[in-house]
Structure formats: structure tokens, C-alpha cells
Image (tube, rainbow, N blue to C red):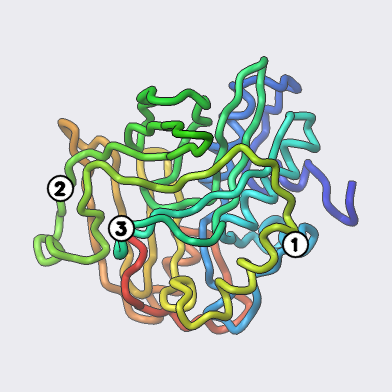
Amino acid sequence: MRGNMDIEAYFERIGYKNFRNKLDLETLTDILQHQIRAIPFENLNLHCGERMELDLEATFDQIVRKKRGGWCIQVNQLLYWALTTLGFETTILGGYVYLTPINKYSNGMIHLLLKVTVDGRNYIVDAGFGSSYQMWKPLELISGKDQPQVPCIFRLTEEEGIWYLDQIRREQYILNQDFLNSDLLEKNRYRKIYNFTLECRKIEDFESVNTFLQTSPTSIFLKESVCSLQTSDGVFCLMGFTLVHKQFGYKDNTDLVEFKILNEEEAEEELKNKFNISLEKKVVLKHGDHCFSI
């Protein structure tokens, strides 16, 4: 145990009560699903005048003790700690995110994800992508196989040692017709998400990108505040002052999407009600170039 970090506090934070003491795929899936439904993907520290910490104990304090969320480097590092503490064979990997506005993958390694080996099989586990790009189950590391899940169909493809994660999405029915052309809507049915190699990484490999993402004027995380949390049948996202709810598989290969524009007071209430977040400092929610989408 490091400092005041203990696995029972983590279990309590994610609402996980039935640890079976078995290091199998069922347990791994259970832990992933509990974490993504309890711990939001969010960058609100940056919009409260605070840093997004890389240190594991600071991350544990933020997410577990203060009941906050975090971005991929934080939430997946916490998941890595939890899984290795339990005894899962877990490796940190680094990903290059597909940037839709410029139709290419990021130059830098800006995403932290995990590889977990269970019963001789390798799985990709990622609790830190948010919105409707978030996997709900571990993805078996097999090239070219469609892996249907509740949010969408995921597909991993390997080419010359580089693995690509893509998704095939459903149609979207927009409840509020005024938002049919919203730039928050993902327009592509087939969506590239990120690529990665199986090279083992350390948390120190993400120090420079952790600093860049919260200091560079070009960082999408500085341009827009985002908070995203998975539910039992969909996902809630707060992007700036726009609250979006998506219900997966609402009918016939169609997801239901509902938009709501909030004022400042309503946004703080929804952070508490939908995301279980109470901030210690005043948050300045920000609409940017809408680099994030639902």
C-alpha cells in the first residue's frame, strides 16, 4: 500500500461490492464497468485554475477521496494501480489519438491505455476516453474481428506492429431538431479512435504531454471544458454549458440524443446530480472549437 491508498477505498469509490477474488475476464469487466459509471472523464481542474496531476497519490486523492474524475492519464493510471494491486498482469501502453478536424493521428503520444493478460489472452482496457467512444468491456487483442458492445461495434486492426482502434456507430435520432447540425454530433458512422503499439510504457513517459495538454494554447483541453459519465444504457456529457444525453440502441440500430443548454447555476447542479461532482473552486465552463463530440 502506498501512503493512504488502499483498494477498499477504491472499491467503495466505484461502488464495487462483490470482488470474487478471481483474476478472470468477468472480474476485469466488472471493475471496468463500475469505474466508468462512477468516475467521470473530465478536465475541470483546468477550468478551476488547478493542475491535472500526474502523481499517483495525488490522482488517488483527487478521484477517490474527493470523488472527482480525471482525464485518461489519471483514470487509467488509477485503474492500472487497482488491477496490479489485485494481481492482474497489466501493462501501460501509449496511444496516438485520431483528430477528426485534421483527419490524422496526433503526432504525440497523448493517450494512456492498458493491456491486461487473462488466461493467456491479451485484452485492451481503457476507462479514459469518454463520450460514446468509451469501451464498456475489455477488447480482445485480435486483428480484424468485430467486437460488438452496447455503445457500438469496436474493431482492432494490426498493421506492421501498429494497432488501430476503430468503431462502427449506429444512426442517431436527435430529439431536439434545433441541434441537427450541432458540431457536438459525431458525423461519421465508421470512426477512427486511436492507434498504439504494444511497447511497455511508464507513467514518466507521459510527463511532457501532461504538461503540454494543460499549458499549450493549442491544447483542446484548455479550449473546452468536458465532463462525461457512462450510465447503465448510455452516456451523459457536459461540454461547456451544453448537456447531452445519449441512449444507446434506443430503437432499430439507432441511438437517441438529447441536448439541453444550461445556465451557470443549472450547470453546477447537473455536475452534482448527473456526475456526482462538487467542486472546491469556482469553475469557468468553456465552449471551445468543439473538438469533443458525442
For label 2, the SS is strand
For label 3, the SS is loop
Mark 3 vs mark 2, CA separation in Å:
25 Å
| Residue 208 falls in image quadrant | bottom right
| Label 2 packing within 10 angstroms: few (<14), some (14-19), many (20+) | some
Q: Which residue is mark 2?
A: 173
In x, y percent, where is residue 221?
Answer: 48, 71
Q: Is residue 24 left or right of residue 61?
A: left
Q: Who comes first in sequence, dot 2 or dot 1?
A: 1
In x, y percent, where is residue 79?
Answer: 67, 44
Q: Is residue 91 left or right of residue 292?
A: right
Judging depth in this view, the residue of 102 and 229 nearest the camera is: 102
Amino acid type, callout 1: Asp
Q: Which residue is mark 1?
A: 61
Q: Is residue 26 left or right of residue 91?
A: left
Mark 3 or 1, which is nearer the eye?
A: 3
Judging depth in this view, the residue of 188 and 143 nearest the camera is: 143
Outermost residue toward the left?
177
Q: Residue at x 78, y 32 (%)?
A: 86
Q: Which residue is mark 3?
A: 103
In x, y percent, where is residue 51?
Answer: 65, 76
